[in-house]
Image: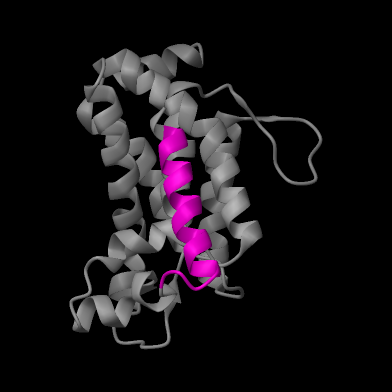
Amino acid sequence: MVTIAIIILTVAISLLCFYGGLDLDKLKFSAHDVWHRRKWWQLVTYGFVHGGWGHLFFNMLTLYFFGRVVEQYFAAVWGEPLGQILYVVLYLTAIIVSSLWDLFKYRDDWSYSAVGASGAVSAILFASILFEPKMGIYIYLIPIPVPGYVFAPLYLLYCWYMARRNADNIGHTAHFWGAVYGLVFPLLLRPDILQHFLHQLGI
């Protein structure tokens, strides 16, 4: 499956960075370097490196569960191999799109950098909600699953609020725009998916 291949590639590149096999500074997203030094590859490569084991594990675990859902629906809607190709396009472009806000915002800040697949994983998560809005999603410390259609607006509000606070070292803006992109991408290709979404909700 494509999801497994992405996970293997991400884990391999991240581990090489952890143990010195690859230079993290060349792969991480530096808004200043992308904008002023034209290191455009960083708009993609940063999504395959992570800041630590916990960061890597959480992103890849989320991708494993929800990526398989999206991959199956893409194959059902567009057939194979087109569905698999579009799935890869969604993932890779989500890495880029989720970083654009921070690129413009921090383009003159040489100290700003980011790593991780969180923006792309958020896109995959929200694409899965688009296809299965009633699926249960577990949130930390809440012992019962939250329906996707409830989780989605709460997640976006949380990301927006935390991005405005700017009180931690988490890329909440990337999470927000990645999630939005995960909804927009399938709908741009097949607007009738919206009817499927509404039907799943009984509307």
Considering depth in this image, is 169 or 7 the residue closer to the camera? 7
Residue 29 rendering spot, x and y as whole percentages: 36, 71
Considering depth in this image, is 190 or 75 the residue closer to the camera? 75
Name the quadrant of the N terminus: top left
Q: Is residue 85 in sight in this rendering?
A: yes
- The answer to which quarter of the image holds residue 151 is top right
Q: Residue furthest front?
A: 21
Residue 3 rendering spot, x and y as whole percentages: 44, 34
Work out whether 76 lies above or below 74: above
Residue 8 rendering spot, x and y as whole percentages: 47, 44
Work out whether 3 lies above or below 33: above
- Which residue is at a point 51% across and 52% down the rendered structure image? 11
- Which residue is at a point 74% across and 46% down the rendered structure image? 140
Q: Is residue 66 magenta?
A: no
- Which residue is at a point 39% across and 45% down the rendered structure image? 180
Segment colored magenta: 3-22
Considering depth in this image, is 188 or 115 the residue closer to the camera? 115
Report the number of discs: 0
- Which residue is at a point 37% across and 36% down the rendered structure image? 183
Considering depth in this image, is 116 or 199 the residue closer to the camera? 116
10 to the left or right of 138? left
* Magenta portion: prevailing SS class: helix
Q: Is residue 9 magenta?
A: yes
Q: Which color mode does the image show?
A: one colour
